[in-house]
Amino acid sequence: MIYQHNEEMLDAPFYYNIKNMNVLKFKEYIKENKSEIYGGGYVNRYITEITDDADKLPTWFMEVMVKPRQFKIQKVLIDDILNRDADLYEYCISGQQRYDVDETNIENLYKYATIVDDTVIDGYNRISTLKRNGEKYVYSFVAL
């Protein structure tokens, strides 16, 4: 099944589970469901839901880079992303952190990043924090 639109999110098991499970169960869920294809409307809604201030997301970003695409969940090697995305690499080596460490919930670190054409368009802070914590991989929505 391809999850396309916002109304389908209510039926999509991923959306419910990402908000209601602990990290270990979430990782198992990802392993079992990574063959699903998600439409850009679904991924757009996901990004909007996990963003603290969705009003800051540029409309063109969603309309041009996310909504027209289809995505698949993939386990991506963080070092591979850093080698392909110069802006993410600069962000990681800068040591910059968008959120106070005390505000960062461990489950939030395991929410999907979003990658389009080898560029991370959502998830800089999560990937940077995972890298600093010694993680090797990040699960991501990767555009097909």
Image: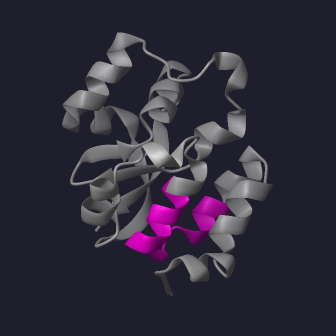
Give the quadrant of residue 38: bottom left
Left or right: where 118 falls relative to 138: left
In the displayed structure, 65 sits above or below 68; it is above
Query: Which residue lies most toward the front here?
Result: 55
Residue at (52%, 25%) from the top-left corner?
129
Q: How is the image coloured?
A: one colour
Q: How many labels does the image show?
A: 0
Residue 136 colored in magenta in the image: no
Viewed as shown, does residue 125 lie left or right of 33? left
Q: Is residue 85 above or below residue 34?
A: above
Question: Which residue occupies 37% across, 21% down?
Answer: 92
Residue 60 left/right relative to 109:
left
Q: Does 9 appear above or below 55?
A: below
Residue plotted at (65% across, 18% down) = 101
Q: Give the range drawn in magenta.
A: 29-47
Secondary structure that dominates the magenta span = helix
Residue 52 placement (x, y as % from top left): 59, 41
| Image location (x, y in percent) of residue 74 | 43, 58
Is residue 36 highlighted in magenta? yes
Q: Percent position (x, y) of residue 22?
A: 78, 48
Up-down relation of residue 15 to residue 59 (above or below): below
Looking at the rendered image, the quarter that the C terminus falls into is bottom left
